[in-house]
Amino acid sequence: MNTFRKLRERFFWLSYVAAVIPFISGFIGYRVIGGMGFWETVYAAVALYFVNPVVDTENPYIVFAEITSVIVVAGIILSVVRYATKRVGHMFIRLHKDATVVYSDNEWGKELLGTIRHGYLVGNTERAERVNNHILMFSDDINNLSFYTKHEKKLKNKNVYMLMQQVDSTLLEAADDEEASLHFFNIYDLLARTYWKDNNLYDKRKQALKIAIIGYDQVGIAIFKYGFLNNIFAPDQNIEYHLWGCDEFEKIFVRSLDTMNNDRIIVHDGNWDEDIDIVAGMDRIIYTIKEHTVEALQRLLYINPEAEIHCYSEFLTDFSDLYLSDRLLTFGDIKEVLTEDNVKGETLYTLGKLFNYDYCLRYAGRQAPDNFRQEMEEEWKKLSGFYMDSNVARADHYWIEQKLAEDGELAEDSEVAWRLEHIRWCRFYFINHWTYDKVRDNEKRHHPMLVDYDEIPVSEREKDGIYDARIKEEISRLLLSNGKM
């Protein structure tokens, strides 16, 4: 069925050819065999579509035209009914405040739509639907950006969630502060976020851990990035990341990253199976290569049967059912990753907006007014892709800070809390290709605060805490209402 649909979409013009077959057959029957005049023939052939023969002439061509014209007309009527039914359905969906439209030309969009309570799919870029939430998921990032640019006025004050696969959203300028509330997301970033949320290291945070990431394409890069950004539990922790499969550019870049604590990043030059002794010492092995998975898993089970072996499976094969190991886990199910909550991430985005607004209040020397939400949204719209990501990354790690506080290992607005936040903040800048310089230069990605915590002034250290009491209260309320505290 899917094959037929794909062929129909690819060769759409065949339906138009089929629609004129009755006319051609009728024309031959009336004109060539029946000997009618040209315009009389045209009229008679067209009349067949209305199941209303105007001439009594009968021959095989005319009979064939009569039969096929009924099929064509029935198809047109069914298409009109389907279109009308769909439009009416869309109209009722748009009555809901959380109505969401997914604009997509691929299977990912369809997967996401299945998780959306009040939503529908649109496969073209001709117009922006009249809803509050718009998810742009075309295969080509340029189509997503073009859609937003083309319909920017219609998207004013709407929520727009834009898929970015080829374009680095941190390089994009700020949207117009009078237009949409714009958010960016990446499928593999969502996958990595979900992975570290479900398989976090919190309970092992006091151990010296060695983590192997085998394969450094889109999946491996995302897994390392979000592990690097979120696995921050203490200034003296000791986590080693061992990477196999980096290209030359990534090797140079990753080796330059400063962890700002005792963590280490070790990039290996050869293939992972050439470093058997090193792999044998890993606590967790994350395998992200798509080819030869079964052979690789078996080797890993031979080499290090006591390690947690986590395998990315593009085809959703649950390898844990194949082997006698309770430490083997498969991740990467797109159905678990592409959900309304993950993409729209209301709690995460709202927390990001709150952190950004708190930062704005601090620099303005103000306190949040009673009705601060509109101003908070306006400040968010001024941000570039980089600073949006920065605030979302802050929100992403916040659950760890709260958990540490609950377990009595961290006090808010304490030196330890500020030190951890400074480490996290530096790592975000480093992973996005910023470096230290005495003079800040946003275009060159230079920042004077990318130094050890002890080297920054006390006034700068305090900025890592939450400044405004009302904003702090709102953050706590939001986390509590979503079961995060």
Image: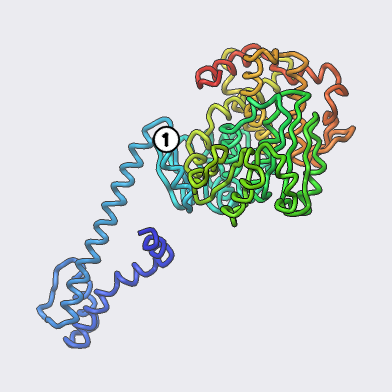
- Here the colouring is rainbow
Total label count?
A: 1
Q: Where is residue 76 in the image (x, y as percent from the top left)?
A: 27, 60
Q: In this view, does 347 lie to the left or right of 5?
A: right
Instruction: Say which quarter of the image contains residue 202.
Output: top right
Q: Nearer the viewer, residue 412 or 388?
A: 412
Residue denoted by label 1: 99
- Residue at the image position 61 percent from the left and 34 percent from the top: 196
Q: Is residue 347 above or below residue 83?
A: above
- Residue at the image position 90 percent from the left and 32 percent from the top: 438
The quadrant of the rendering that contains the C terminus is top right
Regarding residue 384, the answer to whether it shows in the image is no
Q: Position of residue 326 (x, y in %)?
A: 54, 37
Instruction: Say which quarter of the image contains residue 118.
Output: top left
Regarding residue 172, the answer to whether it shows in the image is yes
Label 1: few (<14), some (14–19) or many (≥20) C-alpha neighbours in 10 Å: many
Q: In this view, does 81 lie to the left or right of 285?
A: left
The quadrant of the rendering that contains the N terminus is bottom left
Amino acid identity at mark 1 = Ala
Q: Nearer the viewer, residue 477 or 441?
A: 477
Q: In this view, does 5 lie above or below 39?
A: above
Q: Nearer the viewer, residue 481 or 24?
A: 481
Q: Is mark 1 on a helix, strand or loop?
A: loop
Q: Is residue 269 above or below residue 479?
A: below
Q: Where is residue 6 in the image (x, y as percent from the top left)?
A: 41, 61
Q: Position of residue 270 (x, y in %)?
A: 76, 54
Q: Residue furthest right?
A: 438
